[in-house]
Image (tube, coloured by chain):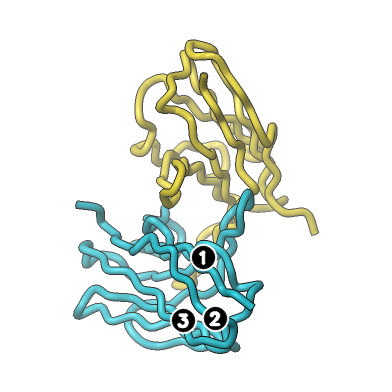
Amino acid sequence: GAGVSQSPRYKVAKRGQDVALRCDPISGHVSLFWYQQALGQGPEFLTYFQNEAQLDKSGLPSDRFFAERPEGSVSTLKIQRTQQEDSAVYLCASSLAFIGDSYNEQFFGPGTRLTVL
Amino acid sequence: QKEVEQDPGPLSVPEGAIVSLNCTYSNSAFQYFMWYRQYSRKGPELLMYTYSSGNKEDGRFTAQVDKSSKYISLFIRDSQPSDSATYLCAMSRSGFQKLVFGTGTRLLVSP
């Protein structure tokens, strides 16, 4: 079956431009996460949605970062006035809703590699 | 200091070797411990997870968690060139919350 898809796969932006990154989660997955992975580092949490509700945005590095999931399916991560330090791979992950004590596996997409010049 | 520490490597081993990867952490609230594998230009994929302390085995892979020492390990037996990837440890407070990752260890298995 189809996994998590992200688009575009690669994005080059000039400093100061706005960018929008899209995530299509696995159908039926209630939870959606965004992570940022800098070169040579592990992914770092940005924000979390349960359906259309943004329940945790504590990882967003500044108010230039904004995420939405208006219909509880596709999500968009928007970065305004991009800076060089925003260059990273942005990963999206989705999982089923909370089920007991089991780990609800987060399935990751391939990521969007953002380069800010 | 990061919540999760992991040696970035690279770790180079010959085919057939036993590989030991590990992470330490500082937050005693973590209850779920995962190992993800990430190939170049791909997203992480789950290898194994363990709830609380103990061991778990799946084929050539064994995961160990020692909560008293805040130390987790992943062992790979009979390593193959196809195991060459970056191995990320990850932890969470519950089964459905955000993951906190280590830096990742790059593993190279030579034929």
Residue at 49% over, 36% down: A88
Residue A16 placement (x, y as % from top left): 48, 11
According to the colouring, which chain is cyan?
B
Is B44 placed left or right of A9 in the picture? Answer: left
Residue A91, numbered circle: none
Name which residue type carries label 1: Tyr
Using the rendered image, report if marks 2 and 3 lie on a common chain. yes
Q: In the rendered view, tell whether residue A95 sits above or below residue A39.
A: below
Q: Chain of mark 2?
A: B
Q: How much space separates mark 1 and mark 2, taking CA atoms?
A: 22 Å
Which residue in the protein does label 2 denote? B14
Which label's residue is closer to the chain start, 2 or 3? 2
* Corner quadrant of residue B7: bottom left
Element carrying mark 3: strand
Name which residue type carries label 3: Val
Q: Chain of mark 1?
A: B
Which residue in the protein does label 3 denote? B19
Residue A44 placement (x, y as % from top left): 41, 46
Which residue in the protein does label 1 denote? B36
Q: Chain of mark 3?
A: B
Mark 3, other Cα within 10 Å: few <14 / some 14–19 / many ≥20:
some
Residue B30 placement (x, y as % from top left): 30, 66
Name which residue type carries label 2: Pro
Residue at 28% over, 81% down: B66
The quarter in which the N terminus of chain A is drawn is bottom right
Mark 2, other Cα within 10 Å: few <14 / some 14–19 / many ≥20:
some
| B102 or A34, nearer to the observer | B102
Which label's residue is closer to the chain start, 3 or 1? 3
Element carrying mark 1: strand
According to the colouring, which chain is yellow?
A
Labels 1 & 2 near each other (Cβ < 8 A): no
Is A9 placed left or right of A65 in the picture? Answer: right
